[in-house]
Amino acid sequence: MTDHREPLPSVLETIGETPLVRVHDSPDAVPVYAKLESFNPGASIKDRIGKYMLERMLEDGTLEPGGTVIEPTAGNTGIGIAVAAEQLDVDAVFVVPERFSVEKQQLMRALGADVINTPSEDGMGYAIERAHELSEELDGAVVPQQFSNPLNAEAHYATTAPEIDEALDGAVGAVVAGCGTAGTLMGMAEYFRERDAETHVVAVEPAGSAYREFFGEDVDHEEYKTEGIGTHDIETNELFDPDLVDDVHAIPDRKVHEEMARLAREEGQLVASSAAANSIAAKQVARAIADGTIDAPHDAVVTVFADSSERYLSKGVYRSFEEWTG
């Protein structure tokens, strides 16, 4: 857990070292633990890659001080980059499909960034194209591109995974995480597989998302309300390495909605839809380890709760399922 007992020079020093907390609804024999990433200053896991990518890019000269980063994002990455950008003397511009959280877009602007919306129906693929077009129009502009930048996964290899490893004394049997860019899962999977090749790794996506196509499955592409994870075009998800993944769990929106409510009511966890999907999948994996269906090297499953539900209240996450999805 974050334990800062001395004054710090910058908000960037508060990123990481988030709490690792037991999910009560997991089996006693195989507990599930979740990293509570809303404890970061920008209130999500994407603060980690915002800081890490900008610092590395400034170090290697990819980005010059006073330059501009232009990023296609659903919101949290924009907030994470914006938190870091101002502290590191960098301007930030974000290209965001209209359908994503209004709260996130307001926060990006509050942090000093410019936000450019693209049509929802054009998806993240067009937002990526537009970001690259803008980078060519502005001097000193670069696109970190979280969907393809190895620094995304490297940030979690260097920070998230070692924190979990230390907290559990290395006794991690399975790693479960939702995949949007897939950076979180890939970074953690690589770290723990290096320590034990038998570590079980599971990707999580919404039902209707296409990650299962990496494994040759036919997927009916459907809209989903679970936000921040999933894809409709696997060609844009360059970080995902199927060789590091044992299985993909597709979680329906209705179950996600139920789990968001349960986590709040029973466990005091005000977390958003991707966290609920991760919770469901992690518990499924834990129960499979407990009954012997999955052979894992240790009896603990780890996942991440990427952000807070407060960022999505305008979307009705705690109202009825019909209101949330309507």
Image (spheres, helix red, strand yellow):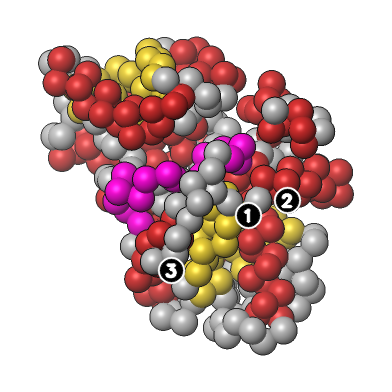
- For the residue labelled by badge 1, is the local secondary structure a helix, a strand or a loop? strand
Which residue in the structure is indicated by mark 2?
Answer: 255
Relative to 122, say whether 286 is above or below: below
- Give me the C-alpha separation between circle 3 and circle 1: 17 Å
Q: Nearer the viewer, residue 130 or 149?
A: 130
Name the residue at 46% across, 24% down: 120
Badge 3 or badge 2: first in the primary sequence: 3
Amino acid found under the numbered disc labelled 2: Lys
Instruction: State the residue lying farthest toward the right.
Output: 266
Q: In the rendered structure, which amino acid carries the disc numbered 1?
A: Ile
Residue at (41% x, 31% y) in the render: 123
The residue carrying mark 3 is 245
Distance from the alpha carbon under mark 1 to that under mark 2? 7 Å
Q: CA distance from mark 3 to mark 2?
A: 23 Å
Q: Which residue is pictured at 37% across the width and 74% down the height?
A: 194
- Binning the other alpha carbons within 10 Å of mark 3 as few (below 14), some (14 to 19) or many (20 upward) gives many
Image quarter where the C terminus lies is top right
Provide residue 72's location: percent of width, then percent of height: 35, 29
Secondary structure, mark 3, is loop
Q: Amino acid at mark 3?
A: Val
Mark nearest the camera among 3 and 2 is 2
SS class of the residue under badge 2? helix
Q: Is residue 142 left or right of residue 225?
A: left
Q: Is residue 186 above or below residue 171?
A: above
The span picked out in magenta is 224-240
Q: Is residue 69 in the magenta section?
A: no
Identity of the residue drawn at 33% across and 19% down = 93
Give the residue at mark 1.
Answer: 251
Q: Position of residue 118 (x, y in %)?
A: 39, 19
Going by the image, does 85 lie left or right of 211? left
